[in-house]
Image (cartoon, rainbow, N blue to C red):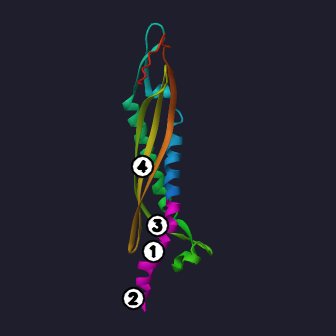
């Protein structure tokens, strides 16, 4: 009888419970990243991350990203997100009792019990800077912070990995250039 119960737990119950709990885990990972981004980057602005050079008339001649500042911010966000995940690891995820039966129509029903999971994760963040044409005399410059979280849920007899990607637009600027005096177009017949 014990063997049947163990097989039932490993083959049927664990996958159902993990699939149910994964939504909660994804929410925790997204929350960890969002909170850490809000905490770390609230004082930094576009001008802190870029070096804008102008000519004598005030026209922008170049924009370069400050890679050192961006990398330091990315490291801080990653570190805070991992601290948050570590703190949440001890809290567990609420799973309704019906989910433990492994029977589909009982999943999500009943009183919730706190499933203590061991969360082992890594968060990696990086900034991406992109320039693209936004019109004849306009260029759009975007700076995006992309965060990747890889979290392993560990239970007896079962381990599952989940990946979460969060993108946050950090800056979006339009750079207006000079309006051309004329424009040549070529059409083919």
Instruction: Tell me the CA gap for discs 3 and 4.
Output: 20 Å
| Count of picture labels | 4
Residue at the disc numbered 3? 117
Per the image, label 1 sits on a secondary structure element best described as helix
Looking at the rendered structure, the secondary structure element under dot 4 is strand
Which residue is under mark 4?
A: 148
- Furthest residue in direction top, as rendered: 56
**Residue reaching furthest front?**
189
Residue 3: mark? 2
Q: Residues within 10 Å of mark 3 (few under 14, many from 20)?
A: some
Q: Is residue 140 above or below residue 112?
A: above
Magenta segment main secondary structure: helix
**Which comes sooner in the sequence, label 3 or label 4?**
3
Residue at mark 3 to residue at mark 2: CA–CA distance: 24 Å
At a point 41% along the width and 79% down the height, the residue shown is 11
**Camera-side residue of 53 and 156:** 53
What distance separates the C-alpha of mark 1 from that of mark 3?
A: 12 Å
Asked if disc 3 and disc 2 are in contact, CB closer than 8 Å, the reply is no
Q: Say few, some or many: other residues with alpha carbon within 10 Å of mark 1 (under 14 / 14 to 19 / 20 or more).
A: many
- The residue carrying pointer 4 sits among few (fewer than 14), some (14 to 19) or many (20 or more) residues within 10 Å by Cα, namely some
Viewer-nearest of labels 3 and 4? 4
Find the magenta span and give its range.
Answer: 1-25
The quadrant the N terminus occupies is: bottom left
N-terminal-most mark, 3 or 2: 2
Residue 165 covered by magenta stretch: no
Residue 179 percent across, percent down from the top left = 50, 14
The residue at the point 44 percent across, 43 percent down is 146
- Closer to the chain start, of discs 4 and 2, is 2
Q: Earlier in the sequence, mark 1 or mark 3?
A: 1
Marks 4/2: CA distance? 40 Å
Q: Which residue is mark 1?
A: 14
Residue at screen point 52% across, 68% down? 20
């Amino acid at each position: 009888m014990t063997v049947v119960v163990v097989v039932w737990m490993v083959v049927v119950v664990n996958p159902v419970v993990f699939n149910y709990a994964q939504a909660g885990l994804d929410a925790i990972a997204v929350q960890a990243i969002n909170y850490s981004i809000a905490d770390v980057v609230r004082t930094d602005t576009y001008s802190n991350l870029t070096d804008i050079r102008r000519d004598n008339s005030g026209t922008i001649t170049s924009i370069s990203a400050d890679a050192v500042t961006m990398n330091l911010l990315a490291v801080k966000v990653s570190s805070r997100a991992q601290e948050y995940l570590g703190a949440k690891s001890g809290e567990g995820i609420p799973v309704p009792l019906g989910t433990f039966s492994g029977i589909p129509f009982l999943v999500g029903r009943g009183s919730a019990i706190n499933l203590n999971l061991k969360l082992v994760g890594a968060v990696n963040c990086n900034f991406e800077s992109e320039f693209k044409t936004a019109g004849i005399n306009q260029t759009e410059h975007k700076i995006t912070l992309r965060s990747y979280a890889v979290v392993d849920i560990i239970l007896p007899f079962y381990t599952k990995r989940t990946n979460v990607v969060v993108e946050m637009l950090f800056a979006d600027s339009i750079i207006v250039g000079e309006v051309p005096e004329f424009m040549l177009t070529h059409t083919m017949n």
